[in-house]
Image (cartoon, helix red, strand yellow):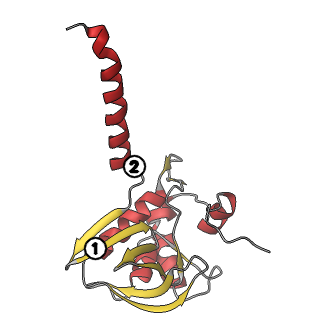
Amino acid sequence: MNLRRLAPWIFVLLIAAGFVVWNFYFDRAVRIDKDGRGIVVQDGDSFIIQQTTIRLDGIDAPELKQNCFSADGSIWRCGGEARNQLAKLLRKGDVKCEPRAKDVYGRTIAKCSARDVPDIAEEIVRLGWAINAADIGQGKYSAAEEEAKAAKRGIWQGPFERPKVYRLQHPREDAPKKN
């Protein structure tokens, strides 16, 4: 068979394979099936459980595509790693959430727990993958934040842009319009 006739088909197959690999490995929501419940982790402070989108109360994690700097100055995907760390906590199972309010995106703001983790938000801050959402030195997770910062855990290992600042520079397409 003539290789020149196959070349366009080989090219198409390589493009299709590249697309499949890209979609499988990059920016895919982490899916967890534990205790009979499907959980889709969207980023470091929000996930979907039983068709309800949950935003953890009192914390702010790096956005999924946000980068941070390590102690040696190299750039890394801290937003993706924050999502992975939240997924790790949720994999413990027995996830329960107490709704507190709704945010502007319609997500349920909630305090959540998992097996051996009484407050997921506090734990994710203590591990260094999110910050206390209140002003610096205030709020219910300020002690956990100070602990992570002193130990240089997670995002505290080097300089990073606060998630709120990152969002101002990279607004969501579905962000509510201000009048």
Asked if marks 2 and 1 touch (Cβ < 8 Å), the reply is: no
Query: In the rendered image, which quarter contains the N terminus?
Result: top left
Q: Nearer the viewer, residue 119 or 156?
A: 119
Q: Is residue 61 above or below residue 109?
A: above
Furthest-right residue in this view: 179
> What's the amino acid at mark 2?
Phe
Q: Earlier in the sequence, mark 2 or mark 1?
A: 2
> What's the amino acid at mark 1?
Gly
x, y percent for residue 25 = 34, 48
Disc ID at residue 121: none
Determine crowd level at label 1: few under 14, some 14-19, many 20+ residues with C-alpha closer than 10 A: some
Name the mark nearer the viewer: 2 or 1: 1
x, y percent for residue 29 = 38, 61
- Residue under label 1, please give it: 38
x, y percent for residue 110 = 46, 87
Give SS at disc 1: strand
Name the residue at 52% across, 78% down: 59
Determine crowd level at label 2: few under 14, some 14-19, many 20+ residues with C-alpha closer than 10 A: few
> Position of 95 compared to 71: left or right?
left
Q: Is residue 154 above or below residue 115?
A: above
Q: Nearer the viewer, residue 138 or 77?
A: 77
- Residue under label 2, please give it: 26
Q: Nearer the viewer, residue 144 or 89?
A: 89
Which quadrant of the view contains residue 133?
bottom right
Q: Nearer the viewer, residue 153 or 140?
A: 140
Name the residue at 39% across, 81% down: 120
Which quadrant of the view contains residue 82?
bottom left
Give SS at disc 2: loop
x, y percent for residue 41 = 38, 68
> Position of 108 compared to 160: left or right?
left
Query: In the rendered image, which quarter contains the C terminus?
Result: bottom right
Distance from label 2 to label 1 (Cα)?
Answer: 20 Å
